[in-house]
Image: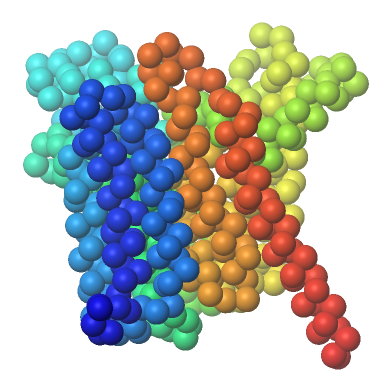
């Protein structure tokens, strides 16, 4: 029999198991000669089983500070165990190290693409030469904003080290866990739900193995909200500004902060202006690679794929109308790139029309959140959640930006919406299935059945949440 003092901590045991399953799969594949990438991908998916057991029992965790320490200790153990796995699912880590190394060599990372011959001089360093060869899309300059560049510089202080860079992202995760606990306490919610974030396979892998900057960005976002709620406005302003400097999307929070807290708004605006002036002085340009990314990239899209299909079907009707209008063609070029010399193709027109639809949907969601939300985190959840649902490009690690809020809301009246994104986080491993073949052949082929399995449960849970909300509103109206 298990002592009752320890029985309450059983969910953490299943959480640790969920975090270790991918690593165990990789190590067993290495010893048996199986494909390591597929082992990691399927381990990513299988980890959902012990995670769901933990999820069911999560409220048995004691609401004590010792519980937070236990969660943090085991979360760190799981993540640092993953450092033995190479970054198999993304090349972003090599770009991070490259950008940071360029800055230390007094080279503007926005000026040259990694394959630019003017950077050949850096090949004299064997580590940088190896990193340069592993960067994805070497023909495009960096897409990462100045806030991210600061993190890259900090993580390469001792030289180009992937372990140090990945450790930086793990630290971001641990800060997120701490902040989820503290934010839950201030809202009289069960802080044990921070364990959902601590041991979610997506969060564990994308920070420790993928080493994605999003973990640090979310840590800064949550810290900024927490500091603001504690009336530490300047600390909150710095944290929120750096979060926006890493991903740009948090800039939208200025709208909600202006409505809710004028003092915080002016603090954030002041720090933001200083940061922008410094960025302009430091880099004297903008992330051109980010523009190329926004113009062309598309992958693992859910609702956007449907919108794009409908846009393609309507092309015979609308294509000539757009081509004959100078202002319409200029909008298309702005949205999908290109120049006025090259004739527009139907695929470009459909892509542009789809993006216009996405912007309209996102604008409606932002307006609704601006009018209805009383919490910065709730407004961010709505904005970023809708953006992920309609975006043409959804890498699994993008979900990190909403999962902390979902963990906070998992035991509240909005739990259906929270559960939808948590389930998405457990299914997003399907987006990696084409990767091994892509690395072998250079061709990325997404499987429609995988998208259906990934997105189907998400939309079902969101629909249930909407229906529940409608019923609740009807009951309130009758009572009034």
* In the rendered image, the vertical position of residue 396 relative to residue 348, given as above or below: below
Quadrant of the rendered structure where residue 367 is?
A: bottom right
Q: What residue sits 9% from the left and 21% below the top?
A: 125
Query: In the rendered image of this protein, does residue 195 appear above or below residue 47?
Result: below
- Residue at the farthest front position: 1
Residue at the image point whose x is 47% and y is 81% from the top = 189
Looking at the image, the residue that sits furthest to the bottom is: 480
| Res 84 quadrant in image | top left
Task: Name the foreground residue: 288 vs 369.
Answer: 369
Pick the quarter of the image with the C terminus.
Answer: bottom right
Residue 95 appears in view: no
Residue 53 relative to residue 446: left or right: left
Residue 473 pos. (x, y %): 80, 77
Quadrant assignment for the N terminus? bottom left
Using the image as rendered, state which of residue 127 and residue 191 is in the foreground: 191
- Residue 289 vertical placement versus 304 (above, below): above
Relative to 472, residue 349 above or below: above
Q: Which is more toward the observer, 193 or 131? A: 193
Residue 409: x and y in percent read 53, 71
Counting from the top left corner in percent of width and height, residue 82 is at 23, 45
């Amino acid at each position: 029999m298990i002592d009752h003092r320890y029985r309450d901590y059983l969910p953490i045991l299943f959480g640790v198991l969920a975090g270790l399953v991918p690593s165990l799969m990789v190590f067993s594949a290495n010893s048996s000669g199986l494909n390591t990438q597929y082992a990691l991908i399927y381990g990513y998916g299988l980890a959902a089983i012990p995670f769901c057991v933990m999820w069911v029992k999560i409220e048995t965790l004691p609401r004590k500070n010792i519980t937070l320490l236990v969660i943090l200790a085991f979360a760190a153990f799981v993540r640092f165990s993953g450092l033995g796995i190479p970054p198999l699912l993304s090349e972003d880590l090599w770009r991070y190290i490259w950008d940071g190394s360029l800055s230390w060599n007094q080279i503007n990372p926005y000026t040259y693409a990694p394959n630019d011959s003017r950077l050949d001089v850096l090949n004299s360093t064997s580590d940088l030469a190896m990193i340069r060869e592993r960067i994805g899309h070497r023909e495009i300059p960096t897409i990462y904003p100045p806030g991210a560049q600061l993190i890259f510089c900090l993580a390469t202080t001792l030289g180009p080290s992937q372990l140090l860079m990945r450790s930086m992202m793990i630290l971001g995760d641990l800060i997120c866990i701490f902040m989820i606990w503290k934010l839950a306490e201030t809202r009289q919610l069960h802080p044990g739900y921070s364990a959902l974030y601590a041991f979610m396979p997506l969060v564990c892998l994308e920070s420790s193995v993928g080493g994605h900057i999003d973990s640090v960005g979310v840590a800064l976002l949550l810290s900024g909200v927490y500091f603001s709620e504690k009336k530490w406005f300047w600390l909150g302003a710095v944290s929120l500004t750096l979060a926006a400097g890493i991903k740009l999307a948090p800039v939208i929070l200025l709208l909600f902060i202006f409505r809710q807290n004028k003092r915080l708004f002016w603090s954030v605006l002041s720090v933001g202006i200083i940061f922008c002036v410094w960025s302009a002085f430091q880099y004297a340009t903008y992330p051109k690679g980010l523009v190329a990314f926004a113009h062309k990239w598309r992958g693992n899209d859910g609702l956007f794929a449907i919108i794009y299909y409908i846009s393609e079907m309507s092309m015979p009707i609308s294509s000539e109308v757009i081509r004959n209008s100078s202002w319409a063609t200029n909008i298309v070029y702005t949205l999908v790139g290109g120049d006025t010399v090259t004739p527009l193709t139907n695929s470009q027109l459909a892509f542009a029309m789809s993006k216009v639809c996405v912007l309209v949907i996102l604008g409606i969601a932002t307006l609704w959140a601006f009018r209805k939300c009383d919490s910065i985190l709730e407004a961010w959840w709505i904005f970023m959640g809708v953006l992920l649902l309609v975006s043409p490009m959804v890498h699994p690690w993008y979900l990190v930006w909403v999962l902390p809020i979902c963990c906070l809301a998992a035991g509240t009246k909005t739990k259906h919406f929270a559960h939808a994104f948590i389930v998405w986080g457990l299914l997003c491993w399907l987006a990696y299935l084409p990767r091994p073949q892509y690395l072998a052949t250079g061709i990325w082929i997404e499987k429609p059945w995988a998208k259906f399995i990934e997105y189907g449960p998400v939309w079902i849970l969101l629909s249930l949440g909407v229906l529940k909300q409608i019923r609740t509103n009807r009951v309130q109206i009758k009572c009034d």
